[in-house]
Structures are given as C-alpha cells and as structure tokens.
C-alpha cells in the first residue's frame, strides 16, 4: 500500500470532501438524492419490477385503465404503460446527463482558454456566445435540430450546444479573477506551462461555482430533452421516453388520463430531485466560495 | 450616457450581424446535399434539383449568397417557403398576432398571480401561508410546461368542461388555458421576486416613518411599499420575453394554436428551411431589440450603472 500524502484530493479533510459533507447534511439534498437514486434504480432495474415488454403491442387490451395487471394502464395500441414508464426513464435521464456533459466540456474549455489568454480569441468567443445567447434556449435547440435532423443523438447535441454559452461565460469570469492570484503567478514563476496552470490551478478553483451550474443544468437538460421529445423531434417510435410518451398520450387525453399523468410525473420528479440537490449545492458553495465574482 | 447608449446599440448590431450569419448558415450546415434533404427520397429529376438549387440561390459563391440574404432580410424579404411557395415574411406576419396575444396574456397572468402571491407571502412572512406560497413556487419551477398544460386540459376541459382544449382565437375562453400554461412557471418566479423585493422595502426607513405617522396599514402597503417593490419585478418581466417566445413553441403545439412557435416546429418537420430561418431570425431579432431596450431603460432609471 502506498501512503497517500496528506495533501491528496481524497484525504478526509480536503475541500472537496468537506463540500460533499456539507451537501450531504442538507435535508433537501438528502430528499432529492434519495428520489433521484430511486428513479435511476427503478428505470435501470426495470426487469425486476415488470416482466412485460415495453414495445409489445396487444390491440385487444388497448386503453385499459390502471389495474393489478397493468399498474399504469395501457396505451392506444395495448402496450403496458408501467413497463414503458420504467424503461422510458433510462432514456430521459441519459439525455439530460449527456446533454449537460457536452455543454460543460465545450463551454468550460472555451471559457478557460478565452479567459486565460484574452486577446482576439477572447473577443471572438465572447461575441459568438453573445450571438448564441440571442436565441431563446429552446429555439436554439430547435435550430440545431433543423440542421442535423431529428433523433436522440442530435437532441443531446442540440441541448449540449444550447448550454455552451452559460458554461463559457461563468468559467471565463472566474478565470479572469483567478489568473491574477498570487499562486498562479508563483506557478508561472516556477516555470509551469500554461496548460498545467489552467488544469492544475485554475480549473479546480473554478469548480465550486461551476458545480452549481452543472447540477441545476442537469435538471434543465432533462426538461429540454423531454420538451424536444414531446415536440416529436427526439426518440423514434416505438422507443419509450417520457416526453415522447406524453406526446402520444395527448391524443387520448379525453379517454385515458393515465397516459398523460404518469410520464409527466416522471419528468417532474426527476427535475424536482435535481433542483433540490442543486439548491443544496448552491447553499454549500455560497458558504465557502473563494472565487471573487467578476466586477 | 450618450457614450453608453452608442456602445450598447453598437454591441447589439454586432450581435444581430452574428445572428444573421448563423441563421444564414443553417442551410449550408445540413449534412450532405441540402436539396436531397428537402426533396427526400422521392424520385426527382435532375431538373427539379437544379430548379431548387436555383430557387435557393445555391449556385453563387457563399459571400454573394450571404450578401443577398442580408440585403433582402433588411428590406423585409425573408425568401419563399419551399412547401407552400408563399413569402416567409407574410406567413410570419400572419402568425405573429396570435403568438403576441398568447405571450401578452401569459405575461399579465404571471404578473397578477405572481405578485399577489408574493405580496401575500411577504405580508405574512414566516407563517404557514409564506411556506405554502414558497413551496408552490419551487414545484412550479420544476413542472414541465407541457405536462402542466395537459393537466390543465384534464382538469378544466375534460372534467369541468369549462374551456376548450383546442383553441385558435383570441377570446378570453380561447386564451385562458394556453396563457395559464405559459404563464404559471413565470408566476412562480415572479412570486419569489415579489416576496424578496417587498420584504426588502418593508424594512426601509420611509415605511417606518409612514407607519410612525399613523397612516393606516393598507395605505402604507399599497401606496408606499408596493410601488417601490414592483420596480425590480417589472424590469425582470420585460426580460422574460425570450422565455415566452421559446415556450410558445410547446404551448402552441399542444393546443394546436396558430403562431410562430408552431410554425417553426412544423417547418422543421417538413424541412422548409427558408421558413425555419425566417422564424428563428425574427424571434432572435425581437429578443435582442427588447434586451437592448430594457438595458437602456434600466441605465436611464439607475444612475449608479451609468457612472461605472
């Protein structure tokens, strides 16, 4: 066993661990975390809870109300709504997570580089972000879908790109403050390369502020993914997905309330759980922020 | 002040310039040949492809195409729809009043419901009523618009049979459900802001003075506090136009309402690129202009920012 030096990021007293402890002590984070884990468990362990195939049609049992056999009823072509609800969660949650990851990776990289180096590159990127921000978010995603064509992968990309401006702006403003810090100057004096300074010194210190945007962003990203699917621009039928299920259920709103209530409940609970965690993260970070905000 | 004004307008023009480049690029960023994407897999003659390329002006060099696009757009000509051969600007102008009516009603609903609840919460600060309003507001923020719309349809039009679930007009009954769907999440935000702003104002010295003078509580709240508390709320609401225009795509699709949001979604389905470009360009331009205007008004009202 190699003894980890006490400065290791994983030592019990490191800032990251302390932040995590603060978050875990928060009531609303506990509730949100529990809810989120439950949703993930139910959707990924779906075969444990139902033996039905989410895509198997059975017109003879179409539009049946919830019962013991069909806990959430059946849809217009007799598919089990409960099985579709469980399996549909996988895709809805994944779109949210992948969407925000794409947005964060691109946005943070651009923000780091343009904030640190400044100059014409910074002006160009800032102008480009301003331009992207001129589009109402869902409209930007729609325009990207118009270019790439509908589909799950394209929906994730569209959501990711729509998030780039917020990540880029936040990263840039914290880099602008951090690059003047003495420890950055010290690192530079010691001969560290720009890349090393950015990754080892500036990025970890920007992480606190970024963490809030990342958590809350997952919620918005799930919501945006469901919206695109609801508009019919995401998952191809018969793939189960909460937003797409709502779209299909809308036709039967007069006969079958269960087709609109349950998929929407899934989206609502997923977003609510993440918003609760996000509020806790933002409280925890607010108490310990060391990054001065931009003037 | 004049200096700021010029700088702010100049930035907006630069942004609008970028928006026009981005919107212009839509048709060129489509993977593969755009005419194939439009015509689909149907059997087409070489002539049809050539004709479409000519119609879209794809045979000229890029800078010529962009120059023409910008020049035409500035004169209000946004091209011709591929699907119904009507001028894009005419289709948008036809659909705009419906979206405008929806957005305005949603704004009025959001302001009245939101500020009433926020006011109530602030005046009963720390009581169960305050907790209830704040709880409703957090849930309101996590509710997907499209789900809430469906729940409202279930309640008001299926169960209570009060309002139609498909609505195209601009009467109160037609607008009520769509506007409520679009406005409620906004009302949640307004309620939070109103509460915070009111609590802030109620602790100001001039309120204490007004109370000490023996003015009736109602007069103090309505005449002294409310007016000042409303300022930040109203400014914020002006900026929410973007949200309303974006949300219109979903609400209009759901209620099968006319409007530019639904026009955008349908044009994406049918790959009517000139129409998509037109709607996106117009919406973004409206948004940039409103933002610029709000910024300038804000600076005009608040000398602190002017001096920075």
Image (tube, grey):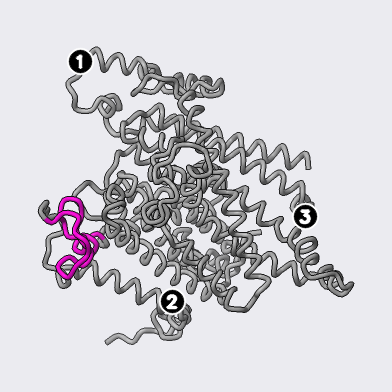
Q: At 35% across and 73% down in the image, what residue appears?
A: A35
| Region of the chain picked out in magenta, as a range | A61-88
Q: Is residue A90 above or below residue A144?
A: below
Q: Is residue B92 left or right of residue A78?
A: right
Q: At 29% across and 41% down in the image, what residue appears?
A: A150
Q: At 20% across and 47% down in the image, what residue appears?
A: A237
Q: Chain of mark 2?
A: A
How many residues crowd mark 3 within 10 Å: few (<14), some (14–19), many (20+)? Answer: few
Q: Is residue B177 above or below residue A33?
A: above
- Residue A214 is situated, as x and y percent measured from the top left of the image, at 44, 63
Q: Is residue B166 left or right of residue B195?
A: left
Are both tags, 3 and 2, on one chain? Answer: no
- Residue A136 is situated, as x and y percent measured from the top left of the image, at 49, 45
Element type at mark 2: helix
Please say whether residue A63 is one of the residues in the magenta stretch.
yes
- Disc number at residue B304? 3
Query: Which of disc 1 and disc 3 is earlier in sequence?
Result: 1
Q: Is residue A196 above or below residue A151?
A: below
How many residues crowd mark 2 within 10 Å: few (<14), some (14–19), many (20+)? Answer: many
Element type at mark 3: helix
- Residue B33 is situated, as x and y percent measured from the top left of the image, at 27, 27
Q: How far apart are labels 3 and 1 at the CA level?
A: 66 Å
Element type at mark 1: loop
Are both tags, 2 and 1, on one chain? Answer: no
Q: At 30% across and 44% down in the image, what residue appears?
A: A232
Q: Chain of mark 3?
A: B
Q: Is residue B233 above or below residue B35?
A: below
Q: Which residue is mark 2?
A: A29
Please say whether residue B264 is one of the residues in the magenta stretch.
no
Q: Nearer the viewer, residue B264 or A12?
A: B264
How many residues crowd mark 1 within 10 Å: few (<14), some (14–19), many (20+)? Answer: few
């Amino acid at each position: 066993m190699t003894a980890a030096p006490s400065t290791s990021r994983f030592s019990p007293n490191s800032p990251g661990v302390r932040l995590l402890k603060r978050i875990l002590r928060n009531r609303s984070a506990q509730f949100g975390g529990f809810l989120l884990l439950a949703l993930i468990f139910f959707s990924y362990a779906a075969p444990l809870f139902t033996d039905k195939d989410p895509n198997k049609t059975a017109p003879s049992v179409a539009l049946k109300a919830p019962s013991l056999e069909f806990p959430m009823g059946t849809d217009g072509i007799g598919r089990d709504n409960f099985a579709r609800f469980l399996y549909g969660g996988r895709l809805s949650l994944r779109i949210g997570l992948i969407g925000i990851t794409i947005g964060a990776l691109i946005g943070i990289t651009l923000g780091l580089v343009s904030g640190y180096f400044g100059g014409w590159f910074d002006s160009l990127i800032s102008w480009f972000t301003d331009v992207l921000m001129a589009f109402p978010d869902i409209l930007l995603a729609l325009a990207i879908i118009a270019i790439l064509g509908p589909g799950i992968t394209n929906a994730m990309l569209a959501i990711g790109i729509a998030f780039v401006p917020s990540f880029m702006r936040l990263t840039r403003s914290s880099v602008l403050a951090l690059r003047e810090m003495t420890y950055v100057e010290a690192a530079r004096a010691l001969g560290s390369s720009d890349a090393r300074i950015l990754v080892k010194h500036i990025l970890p210190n920007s992480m606190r502020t970024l963490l809030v945007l990342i958590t809350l962003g997952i919620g918005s990203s799930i919501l945006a993914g469901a919206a695109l699917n609801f508009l019919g621009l995401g998952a191809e039928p018969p793939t189960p997905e909460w937003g797409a299920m709502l779209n299909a259920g809308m036709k039967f709103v007069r006969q079958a309330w269960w087709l609109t209530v349950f998929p929407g409940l899934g989206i609502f609970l997923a977003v609510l759980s993440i918003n609760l965690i996000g509020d806790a993260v933002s409280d925890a970070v607010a108490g310990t922020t060391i990054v001065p905000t931009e003037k | 002040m004049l200096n700021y004004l010029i700088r702010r307008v100049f930035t907006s023009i630069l942004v609008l310039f970028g928006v026009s480049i981005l919107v212009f690029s839509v048709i060129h960023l489509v993977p593969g040949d755009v005419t194939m994407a439009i015509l689909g897999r149907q059997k087409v003659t070489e002539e049809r492809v050539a004709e479409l390329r000519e119609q879209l002006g794809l045979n000229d060099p890029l800078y010529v195409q962009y120059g023409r696009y910008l020049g035409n757009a500035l004169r209000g000509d946004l091209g011709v729809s591929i699907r119904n051969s009507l001028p894009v600007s005419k289709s948008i102008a036809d659909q705009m009043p419906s979206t405008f009516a929806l957005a305005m009603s949603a704004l009025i609903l959001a302001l009245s419901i939101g500020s009433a609840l926020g006011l109530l919460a602030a005046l009963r600060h720390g009581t169960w009523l305050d907790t209830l309003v704040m709880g409703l507001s957090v849930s309101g923020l996590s509710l997907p618009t499209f789900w809430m719309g469906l729940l409202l349809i279930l309640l008001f039009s299926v169960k209570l049979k009060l309002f139609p679930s498909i609505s195209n007009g601009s009467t109160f009954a037609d607008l009520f459900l769509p506007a409520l769907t679009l406005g409620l999440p906004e009302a949640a935000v307004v309620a939070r802001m109103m509460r915070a702003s009111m609590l802030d104002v109620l602790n100001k010295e001039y309120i204490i003075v007004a109370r000490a003078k023996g003015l009736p509580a109602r007069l103090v709240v309505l005449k002294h506090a409310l007016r000042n508390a409303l300022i930040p709320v109203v400014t914020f609401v002006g900026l929410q136009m973007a949200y309303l225009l974006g949300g219109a795509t979903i609400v209009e699709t759901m209620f099968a309402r006319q409007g530019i949001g639904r026009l955008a979604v349908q044009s994406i389905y049918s790959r009517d690129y000139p129409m998509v470009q037109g709607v996106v360009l117009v919406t973004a331009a409206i948004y940039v202009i409103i933002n610029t205007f709000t910024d300038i008004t804000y600076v005009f009202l608040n000398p602190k920012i002017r001096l920075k």
